[in-house]
Every structure is written in structure tokens, then in C-alpha cells.
Amino acid sequence: MLKNYFKIAWRNLLRNKTATTINVFGLTVGLAVCMLIVIYLVHEHSYDLHFKDHEQIYQVGTVIKRSGDENKMPTAPYLLGSMLQEEFPEISTNTKLLGLFTEDKTLLRYKPANSAPLTFYEPKGYIADSAFFKVFSYEFVEGTATTALEQPRSVVLSDEIAGKFFGKEPALNKRITVASNLTGGDVEFTVTGVFKTTGKPSHIDARFFLAYKGSAIEEYVLSQGKNLVNNNMFFTYLKLKPGTEAGLLEKKFPAFLEKHAGNDLKAAGLQKVQFLTKLKDLHLHSGMDNTVTPSGNLTYLYILGSVALFVLLIACINFMNLATARSSKRSAEVGVRKVLGAEKSSLIRQFLGESVLMALISFLFSLLIVKMVIPVFSTIAGKELTFSFTENLMLILFFFLLAFITGVLAGSYPAFYLSSFKPVKVLKGRITNTLAAATLRKALVVVQFIVSVSLILATVVINRQMNFMRSKDLGFAKEHQLVIPLRSETAKRAYSFLKTEISKNKDVLSVGASVYYPGIFNPEDNNLYKEGQDASQAKHTRINRVDYDFLKTLNIQTIAGRSFSSQFAADTNRSIILNEKAVKEMGFASAENTIGQKVFFNFRNQVLDFTVTGVVKDFHYEDLQQPITPYAFLLNTGSSYNYLIVHGNGHAMNQVISAVEKSWKTAVTDEPFEYSFLDADFQKNYKAQEQLSSLVWYFTCIAIIISCLGLFALAAFSAEQRIKEIGVRKVLGAGTASIVSLLSKDFLKPVLIASVIASPLAWYVMNGWLQKFAYRVNISWQVFAVTLIAAMAIAIITVSFQAIKAALSNPVKSLRTE
């Protein structure tokens, strides 16, 4: 019996090739898209789950409160972790981690015996204390994890970096030079371990670890004494003993802070709260933008999850629509089979079997598509995503069940509807496509286009916001700015020579240098207040140390006073330039009134001061998701800069790059010439948004294609059903245009209704998304107009082909049986 059901089902699918192809293709793509997005969502929710005892590991965060302002950060002072462990027996181990925050990439050099040095710029480097690998379980291919960072000036490399430097030779005990401000310049480190790069997601995306012992940062921390107020820059982790309740431990922190830092906090005019975040929650649920690496965004996951459901819903609606539309074509078959003795239950099983067979075929094709496109999808998503039939078995079983349920649901209406036909009426030709079936199809088309219109509107809004962020004036000249990192001591010493030589080029407009530049992480700050105030009224202010020409190079506008100048010797003695926001926040009457005034800060129980030399117009030193906050420039009196900025002639950038490279190779002979462009570096801050925009755009296109396929098939079916009506109308003088209009309007009405329903829903969701940006576009009426026009145009183009084909058909052929 089952074999017979299968044969009939298979022959019926082959007999209706167009409907079968559209159904299988639509559901295949819908399932594949849904699978890809679910793989992405699973990846985002699996951060740090591979670490042993991850349920017992917590990060210590800090909230600093001052003058009504509250600053939440994932870091804490270095001594806090050790002091907490000494105080509370619930803590078994603590460890500290520090990013190399003064540089986006670090210069590493290895000098093999009897050959030229190997030098590479490597990102994602960290300083860690000796307990790090006791808390975090990395798989070591060389060395011992628990002792790898115990010796001063030791380094642990990833297997990828070790392969670049040493090939297949053992890396253990080899010595490499690390050029970093936080290590104390060009310092030799001994390789004490190599860990395997697994690709498993972690909020600590590291390529190498440097020992805290023997570093310049260790000397700095020791010079600060027992300080739990300042230097909140270390990522601190606690491993709790089994059975410890983190919430109860957290409640003990206020008393601990009062005991060990109460007086210092009062003197600094601030309050402090320490809190715990579970390791597995750091990526998505920390409530902070960065926890070692940029945090994930739940809003984006909700958007992508909705897109997955929407695309699958559209595919399922197509499936059901075409199944119900074709049902009346098989009424004669049902009548004959009933006359020959077929029972209702056997007919139901037959039709459900056909639908489930088609769904399972789609499922098999979707697995192949996912396997083929996962590398491309990983590139677009910016994640290391994988798909295998063994590792993703549960996911495959879930989608198998989903496909089966889809087949049952899609086939249920025609199965029960067709099996209920009376054979006498069927064989007399009295069964037609019922009003209920037609109404159901129109309702499903409305739902389908509500989803499609919502996706179109979301795509338009996201693209407008991305274009806004790309094109908005940031308050400084970002185009044609060449950024050259100065990492080693040799490169830093060459600053003056490089600046002088590069400035001689006629295509170079200006050359400046700084410790930081707009768009990259800037950890340096101070708490400044004006005369007549005290530390409790101080404003948190970011600091950048620059040379005389940095502001000119970036064309940051001075609106009061002046910029730094070598003609004023006093500029080297605590002169400061503030932005407009700092002037306003500190309570000065105006920018002009600020010039010559002093601003103060507390340092090691002393009150020090700066004299305001100038005020610059506000500029975006962070991305547009963040509001502009107080910012200040200090003159760097030495030559220890991290970056050289070259503003070139936009029409001759290739010549500028060649000239800069020539000067570099003259002054810095044993290091590779590395550069980037400021505008591209700034745009990296929008990587997550760019990826979301790309994903939503691609999936929206897929959803529209699936919707159009369904609409195309329904239009063909409708034209086929009304072929005799069209013939009569043509005989009675109806023109092609009127017939096309007649057939098209039935499908345009649901699209119009869908647009009206979808617009407020999509506006609500996307307006909520835009609130995440400090600077954003408005969703104007033009967005809705463009979306409506696009949806109507898509529907017209899809339907018109079948409508025109029907209108041009020969009425003699359609009426010859009458």
C-alpha cells in the first residue's frame, strides 16, 4: 500500500512540473535560509561555553558614579581580584587580563640563526597574569598551560603565529622581540607555550599572551600602591568554588569597598560599585559595548531571527497556496477513486503523503545548499561558522521535523477538503474552486506580503542609516589621511626625520602625530573641574596627546584661542585644548571665556592644573552610536607617538604612499612598512551594522523572490481557471488592457492591504532599532512611499506576465468545447 501511495505521489509531482518546481524551490530556499540563520544564532549563544567549569567563572565589572553621571565598565583595578580572593573563601582563583590598548596591532620580530629577521604586525595581543591559564582552559600543543606565564617576560603564541615564525620547528624557548608601550619598548620575550586555534567563539579573541611579570604595566601598577580607585583597566575574572552563589557574594562587595577604599573614594568625590557577570553572559547579556572584544547585539539577533521565520513563513505560505489552488484540478480523480471504493482515510493519507514527500525533498536540497554556501555566509556574517552532518545533528533533526510538519500543514487543507467531495457531484462537474479556498489564498497572500513589505522597509531604513553614518560630517577631515603605526623604539625615534622628509613632498598637505586618533579605542582619561569646584564635580574627559600639527592635519576647527604652537614655550607646560562639550559640561560661560582659565585634576593626593589654550569645535572621536563627550588635547613634549598621520592630495595618493614608504625604508630599515586609511579605520566601527545590513538585504531579496514565485504560480492558476471567461470577454470586444487589468487587480489589492498593515508594524520595530544610535536618520513618509511603490511594482511585474499571456490567447481555442 505504501509503495502504491509513493508511486501515485511521485507521478503526480512529475505531472505538475511547474507547480512542483516552484513549491520545492521555494521551500528549499526557505529552509536553507532558516538553517543558516539558526547556525548563526547558535554560534552567538555559544560564546565561552567550551571553557572548562565555565559556569563557575565570573567577570568583575565596575560602576563609577560622580555628579549624577554613571559609567559602567567591564574592568577593575589590578589589585581587586587578589584582594577579593584573600577576603572571601568562596573564590578559588582570580586572574587579570589587559588588552594592548595603546595599539591596534603589535610588532613582533624573530631573528633566526644565519638568516634575515622575520617581522610581523600582529593584532589581538594581551597581557595576562600567571593564573590566566588556570582559569581559562586552552589546549596547548607546546609547553604547560598552568606554568606558561609564571616567568617574567614569557609569551604564549597561537599555533598560527608560531607557524609563521618557526615553521615546523619547535617554538618552545625561542626568543622574540615585542615592541609595545605596555611592555616597555622593544623587549625580548621567551616562548613558553603554544596554544591551538580552535575557532570556537570566545569573548577573548587572542592570538598571543604576554606575561604581566616583567612588563612596564607591572611597574606602573606597583608605583600606584594599594589603589582601588583609579586604573580601572584590567579585565578581572573570579573562579568560584562549586556551590557558591554569585549573587550572595556580590552583596558582600559594598562592605569590602568601604573597608578598603572608602576614604579614597570620598577624597576622589565618587562612588563605586563592583558587580559580577557570568562568563557565558558576557557576549550578549553584559549590557556593555565591549567585554575584551566588542559584545554581541541581541537586537540584531532578534532581527535576524525574525527574518529567518519570515522567509520560512513565506515559503510555507507558497507551499500551502499552491497546494490548495491545485486541489480542484484533482476533483475528478477523487470522484473516480471513490466510485472504485477508495475510503476517505486512504485519500487523506495519499494527499498528505504527496505534500510531505515534496517537503522532505525540499529538506534534502536545503541541506546541500547550506553545506555549499556556509563559507560564503561566514564571510558575509564575519563569523567562523561551520556545518557538518555530525556536529549539527540535532539541528538537522529539528529541521527535518520542521519540514515534515510543514508538509503536513500544507497538505492538510487539500487532503481533508478533497477527500470530502461527493463523487456524484464531482463526476457531474459541479465542484469548482470554492469561495473559502479562494479567500484563504488571498489571506495568505496578504500575510506573505506583510512580511515582504516589512523586510523591504527594514532594508530601506538600515541602508539609509548606514549611508548617513558613512556621509555625515564627523568634524574632522577623514579622507586622504594615511595612518602609519610607530611601534618599535626605532620607529618612534624616527618620528622627527619622517615628519620632516614627508612634509617636503608637494602632494603632502600636512603631517601630524598622536598617541590615538578618531575611531580607535582611547583609554586615556582624566577627571577635570574648573576653579571654584572640587573633585566631586569633575567631568570624565578623554585625553589625547598630540604634536603641534595634529589638529591642523585632521582639520579640527579651533573656535576660541589657538592651537598648540612651537612659538609659545608655555605650551609645553600643562597647556590644554578642550572641545565644546567639555567647556559646557564644566560650566564655563562660553568658549571665549574659557581661554586662559585653569582646569584641575586630582592625582596621588595632589591637585594639579592645566591652562586652557584653545577650544575646538566638537568632533566625533567615537562612532555615531556614541554621543560626543568631553575631550581634551595635551601637547606631547617627547617623541613617543603611536601614529603618524599624513594628509595627502586626494588626486595623488599613490605618489604620497610611495614617497612615505621611501622615507620609512630610509629611517626604519628592518621593519615592514604598514599603513591604513583613517576613513576606512573609522568605518570599522560599523562592522556589525554593515554585516546586519548585508544579511538583511540578501535575505529580503530571497524572501521577495519566493513571494514572487508564489504570486506567479497563483496568477497562472487564476488565468487558467478563468480562461473561458477571458475568451467570452474577448469575443464580446474586451481589449488586452482591460483583461490584464481584470486579472491583475485581484492580486494588487492584497499587496496594497499588506502594505497598509505592514507600514506601522515595521516603523515601530525599526524606530526602536534606530534608538540605539546617538545620531540617526528619521523615518520619513518618503520611506513608506518608496516601499509601497517597490511592493506594487514587484507584484505588477510578477502578475503581468501571466495576465498578458492570458489576454493574448486565442479565444477560439478556449471556447471550442462550449
Image (tube, rainbow, N blue to C red):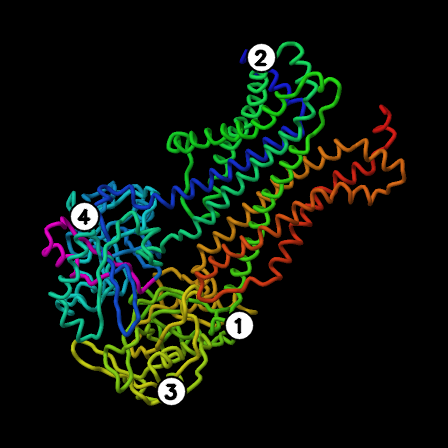
Measured Cα–Cα span from mark 3 to mark 4:
51 Å
What amino acid is labelled 4 in the image? Glu
Mark 1 or 2, nearer chain start: 2
Q: Residue at x 29, y 60 (%)?
A: 100
Mark number displayed over residue 649: 1
- Residue 97 drawn in magenta: yes
**Which residues are the magenta region?**
76-103
Residue 327, above or below 620: above
Measured Cα–Cα span from mark 1 to mark 3:
39 Å
Mark 2 — residue? 4
Q: Quadrant of residue 169?
A: top left
Mark 1 or 3, nearer chain start: 3
Location of the C terminus (image quadrant): top right
Mark 3 or 2, nearer chain start: 2
Residue 267, x across and y down, in percent = 17, 76
Residue 479, x across and y down, in percent = 50, 69
Secondary structure, mark 4, is loop
Mark number displayed over residue 245: 4
Secondary structure, mark 3, is loop
Callout 1–callout 2 Cβ contact below 8 Å: no
- Answer yes or no: is residue 493 visible: no
Q: Nearer the viewer, residue 436 or 137?
A: 436
Mark 3 — residue? 589
- Badge 2: residue crowd in 10 Å (few <14, some 14–19, many ≥20): few
What amino acid is labelled 2 in the image? Asn
Q: Residue at x 42, y 80 (%)?
A: 616
Measured Cα–Cα span from mark 2 to mark 4:
62 Å
Mark 3 or 4, nearer chain start: 4
